[in-house]
Image: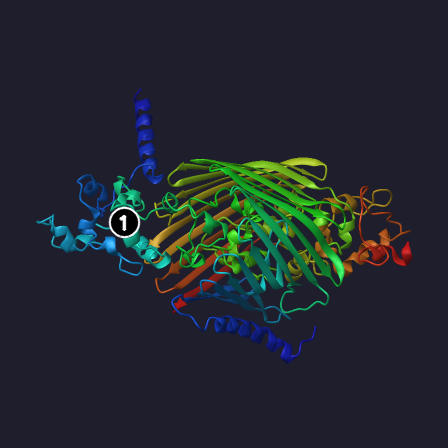
Amino acid sequence: MCKTAAMRRRYWVSPLLAFCGTLGLTRNVCADPLRLRADAVAEAQAPAGLVILEGRDKIRPWLYAEGLVWTGAQNTPNADPAADVMVLAVRLREPHGLGEVRAGRFVVATGAVRPVQIDGGHALARAPWQSTTLEAFAGAPVVPRFGTTGYDWLGGGRIGQTLYSRATIGASYVQRRSHKDIADDEVGADFAAIPVRWLDLAARGAFDLTSPGIADALASAAVRMSPLRVELFAAHRSPSRLLPATSLFSVLGDFPSQSIGSTIRWEAAPRLDVLASGAGQHVGGEFGGNGFLRALLRTSDRGDGNLGFEGRRQDVSSAKWTGLRGLATLPLGRGFRYATEVELAFPDAPRGRGIAWPWGLAALSWRSSSGWEAAGAVEASATPEHRYQMNALLRVSKSLEIR
Amino acid sequence: MNQRLTLLMILSVALAACAGVLGLKGTQNPSHPFEHRAHVLKGVNCKECHAGVNAAGELDDVHFPTPKDCVRCHEKPHDTRDCRTCHTEPYVRASADLARKHLKFTHAQHMAEVKGDCVRCHLGVAEPNPTALRPAMATCFGCHTHQDQWAVRDCDGCHVDLEAEHVKPSSHVVHEGDFVREHGVRAASARDLCSSCHSERYCASCHGVGTVPLLPARRAFDEPQLSGLHSAGFRSRHSEEARAQPGVCTSCHSENSCKDCHTRANVAAGGKAQNPHPPDWLAAGRGGGQHGVQARIDPASCAGCHGGAGEQLCVGCHKVGGSGGNPHGSNFRSTKNKTRDVPCKLCHAGGL
């Protein structure tokens, strides 16, 4: 595609304007500081360079503005410089907590509505007796890199009710249109409760109205008995109903997948955390499972050094593999820190992709008290596509507060 | 016998060493930290050293003792240097400085309520080897229920800016376990609670379609101890992980994500890559080989490469009257108008 000079300029100018817009919003900063952060990231493999700028400010306790833009360049044939605004949002909050309004570009995720990034608005109102909440949102789904699509929009809302300060139930609805056609039309229900201090319950489910049936449903129950936390979870997913209803693949009918399992976190010692998880799965008429065991040992009370280990096994349908991972971080003093991570993944069926996929990374980072950070790493791996691959990564960051 | 004794000794030494590493026993601290407990047991009133703390307002200095305060009792110091050179731990001071920066709090208001009993909040001073002297939030909740503030997510009464504070809750909404998987179901009923600590970009860094072309885990490559999706060699195993959990990828990624990335990496259809499907993928006759079954297990994978204009590939055989036959599942129902709506009209052209 041929781009004019004006279009090319737009890639750079738009995020700059967006970012300046955020700063403009924060002109009247008083006691609270404006927080800025810039990250420059370079990767040798692509090779690519990326600059991420973010700014946020709580201008008054009830007014909050935030922006995050990135711009990058790839040194590959026909690659254009690219940029995008990830977040550009303003949030106004009623001082007594009776409601809030968000406008701009942000992610909407509430109730059973799956997260979607929109250019639009979101409003939340709480009844004065504080047990009922009402939410409404509308906007256009974000098209990456300043693209536009006509007649794409979505709208929806949620009503929630808190019961005796112990439980919340909610009902939500979302409709999304793509080129005027219905891409999503869902109702959902959610529930959360803490009936006693040591028990957390949560569940949510979405029902597809276009092709009637349960799109997805999740449930979780967690019991805390220090030093243990045991969680039971279950999930049901209908993959074709999770696709936009404008896709031909959404009308094939699918084999829903179900999983049920448990995660146990054990604070085995003051500095040693162990996490174990296992689940049985039913995918496409076949039974399988997955599980992992992860341990993290902090080498000091402050946690600035760590040793970690993880073993993982997945055995579902045609996806069968075993993985081992180890990590270590070591403070070197004067703000320097060394980190290393290695992983070995063994597919059960290599199919010409290699019998093991090793991956390793060694990183050195430095952090100053003045807000500067720098980190560099060398990464080496053997992947299904490449027998041997090396990569260098570099990140330089600066955070500052302006009062 | 000697061998057993040697083995036992080695085991004992190993266990003793492990106890230190695991934090089961206090490690020897060469800096001789200030012994709050000894002073508390001696009956020294906190205000004798922390002079003026009982009247301290929100913006006043933190009241750390000076050497002058020490020598009032310790008349003959064993060293000529400033007491704070050894008898201090930097994180205690840093923690107090951060508290002053992040919290709206006056000692003056609280001292009257607790009748000058500092230990009621600063529980750590009575412990042998305290790791923190700043009261945990659970201690605040001992008196302040904050039920009304909690209901309206109003944390501004105490916290200056929770998002900037990067605080990890220890007494409520605890993010432990496999929270990466768990957060979706927990957030469903309380998105507004999440946003009391997490900024917009926190959600957008994973759930945004205009996401920075660098995953958060990739950006923090020097912090491997943080758990996150797509960590370590995810690129190598992403195909296995996607097939094991059909539908999970589409929780965050659009069906075009696969194609976009594969095109960039030059492994997409039309690139240098060969046909990724096995030989029995498209067999003639009833069932048509593996592709029908696999498409029902994980339709998002098919849509990843064959979405959009690529759907014509299916329509060639599966149109009404075509050789592919009816592709709908046995319980297929739809509220769409088959002659007017997308995608029905792709196959049901002419009202068939």
Position in image of residue B48 (x %, y %): 17, 50
Of the pair A126 and A111, the residue shown nearer to us: A126
Left or right, B283 with reference to A269 = right
Of the pair B129 and B200, the residue shown nearer to us: B200
Residue on which the image places disc 1: B112
Residue A146, above or below A194: below
Left or right, B331 with reference to B11 = right
Residue A177, above or below A193: below
Residue lying at the far left of the rendered structure: B76
The mark tally for this picture is 1
Q: Residues within 10 Å of mark 1 (few under 14, many from 20)?
A: few
Instruction: Please identify the quadrant where the C terminus of chain B is shown.
Output: bottom right
Left or right, B257 with reference to B288 = left
Secondary structure, mark 1, is helix
Position in image of residue B232 (x %, y %): 52, 50
Q: Residue at x 60, y 63 (%)?
A: A121
Residue A383 seen in this snapshot: no
Residue B72 seen in this snapshot: yes
Look at the image and name its color scheme.
rainbow
Residue lying at the far front of the rendered structure: A129
Residue B189, above or below A265: below
Position in image of residue B109 (x %, y %): 30, 53
Q: Residue at x 78, y 50 (%)?
A: A251
Of the pair A381 and A306, the residue shown nearer to us: A306
Instruction: Please identify the quadrant where the N terminus of chain B is shown.
Output: top left
State which chain disc 1 sits on: B
Residue lying at the far bottom of the rendered structure: A5
Identify which amino acid the numbered label 1 is placed on.
Ala
Position in image of residue A18 (x %, y %): 55, 72
